[in-house]
Amino acid sequence: MERYDIAVIGTGPAGLEAAITAKVRNKSVLLLGNKGSSDKVSKAHTIQNYLGLPNVSGEDMAKAFLDHAKGMGIEITEDKVNAVYSMGQYFAIQCHGGDYEASSVIVAAGMSAMKPFAGEMENLGRGVSYCATCDAALYKGRTAIIVAYDAEDEEEAEFLAERAEKVYYLPQYDYAGNLGGNIEVSVDVKPSSIAYNDGVATLETDKGTFKADGIFILRQQIAPSQLVPGLQMDGNHIGVDRSMATNIKGLFACGDITGAPYQYIKAAGEGNVAALSAVSYLAELKKAQN
Amino acid sequence: MERYDIAVIGTGPAGLEAAITAKVRNKSVLLLGNKGSSDKVSKAHTIQNYLGLPNVSGEDMAKAFLDHAKGMGIEITEDKVNAVYSMGQYFAIQCHGGDYEASSVIVAAGMSAMKPFAGEMENLGRGVSYCATCDAALYKGRTAIIVAYDAEDEEEAEFLAERAEKVYYLPQYDYAGNLGGNIEVSVDVKPSSIAYNDGVATLETDKGTFKADGIFILRQQIAPSQLVPGLQMDGNHIGVDRSMATNIKGLFACGDITGAPYQYIKAAGEGNVAALSAVSYLAELKKAQN
């Protein structure tokens, strides 16, 4: 498997800046995220205080950022990250679409406004999981509920349904798909809480109760403490020092995920620092290996 | 005297971003620096990693930054700061061209590559000073040496010469002025060291020894520890936390002066954070006063 120098998770200003700075420093970069930057950028009305881009619309700012990255030959890999594991000398990055390796990782995944369902966090890793493709092998002959937030998740449902006996698919977006067979789609169903008892996962909704062997919640984004086992948090944010280092050697964080103020230029500035810290870390790592 | 909400010292990316963010937050801003941004910006060759401004020349970047500030009605006051004093509820800012007051201060003065002369730091406030206009009153009937780095300093020499008996002027730049009278100009003289004994300041140079009651070194920039009495340093940099707060309440710092990496986007990001921290401080201050 190709081992990248630096994996950057997130394509908002922090992630894009980290990627271009890493590229300037001649590092191989895996940039995981969204080809449209981030919703928080592209859907913003007008930004007044991103120095150098006066009075810019979110759409134009996203375009300027993406053009900058593209012009430097940086590609965005559209995949959702399920977990990042420190393996000592490198990191294993488990995504919905496959696995990757990198010598260092920069988490720039932003802050999700999404609140977990009641019972979600308590049952993570037991009845609840965030990646259907990752766990599909465990679902041979079993049943699963998928709470989905994006049309792209339909592919994941189909993959899971090849193994599972039955899949309940609850789209939380405007569903226009054609899932069928052993996938039962229920639209306009709002989940409220999750329980897990005696091997049965129960999802309460405004349209009644769903039961299965497990529940997959395909969030666009998952809590950073769940993303990276052992990561030290500072409240809801990843704890970092001024070099953007976390408590895990070789893993850095930047942007909204490290705390307020939630501002574009602050995020970009931190992305720059995180990338240069990762570059220093790689130099140390190389020295230690020689 | 008008008391500004926020005084920003420095017109590189950190200072300009701090000023525009403060302005967005409806604060009155005194921006002290250079109408051409900073030399470090305007003279840079090409910058590749300022997200949103791909492959930009330093000159174009400085223009983009200055246009942004100008478009928001921010004016730059061209003056050199000699000292910042915390007065409890406000700050007194002593400049070569006059004095100012502000409720909070953001130091974004960059890093000077200039090394002090041997003996300079030891004799600061005794035989050595950084502002001739500030101390002119003390020089009635006395003699002074001025080491100058900019044609603008000639005005300061003339002001001092109105009081002093004799001024030795040693320009360290291409001198094309017409100073005369009791000002003796010596070009191409390289100072090396300073001593101060029994009330006599001695400047050793490659062209011999100069003696006077005091020596003025009109640096473009002075060491931050000299700029703000009591300011806690972290090596050569101002010590700050992630909110860009220093050890002095109401005084913040950002950009190169707070440490590496010396990068434009990092500096701008910190300027944003410093401004928002100053805004929070002003809100607290107002609450405490009510």
Image (cartoon, coloured by chain):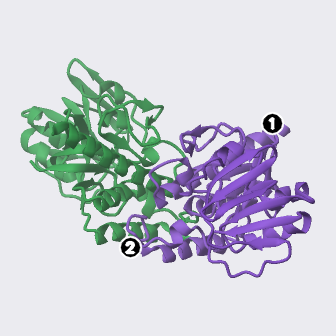
Chain colours: A green, B purple
x then y, percent, for residue B144: 80, 60
Q: Which mark is residue A216?
A: none
x then y, percent, for residue B242: 53, 41
Residue B49 shown left or right of residue B228 in the figure:
left
Q: Residue at x 89, y 54 (%)?
A: B138
The residue at which mark 1 appears reads as: B288
Q: Same chain for labels 1 and 2? Say yes or no.
A: yes
Q: CA distance from mark 1 to mark 2?
A: 47 Å
Crowd around label 2: few <14 · some 14–19 · many ≥20 (10 Å)? some
Q: Decide which of B97, B278 is in the foreground and name it.
A: B97
Return the chain for callout 2. B
The residue at which mark 2 appears reads as: B55
Q: Residue at x 35, y 29 (%)?
A: A121
Locate residue B175: give its quadrant. bottom right
Can see residue A28? yes
Numbered-mark total: 2
Name the secondary structure under disc 1. Answer: helix
Q: Is residue A189 above or below residue A46?
A: above
> Tag 2: residue type?
Asn
Q: Decide which of A222, A190 is in the foreground and name it.
A: A222
Residue A53 shown left or right of residue B27 in the figure:
left
Crowd around label 1: few <14 · some 14–19 · many ≥20 (10 Å)? few
Can see residue A95? no
Name the secondary structure under disc 2. Answer: loop
x then y, percent, for residue A49: 57, 63
Which of the two labelled residues, at mark 1 and mark 2, occupies the earlier sequence position? 2
Q: Which quarter shows the C terminus of chain A?
A: top left
Q: Residue at x 43, y 68 (%)?
A: B52
> Tag 1: residue type?
Ala
Q: Is residue B78 above or below residue B254?
A: below
Return the chain for callout 1. B
Q: Residue at x 74, y 40 (%)?
A: B284
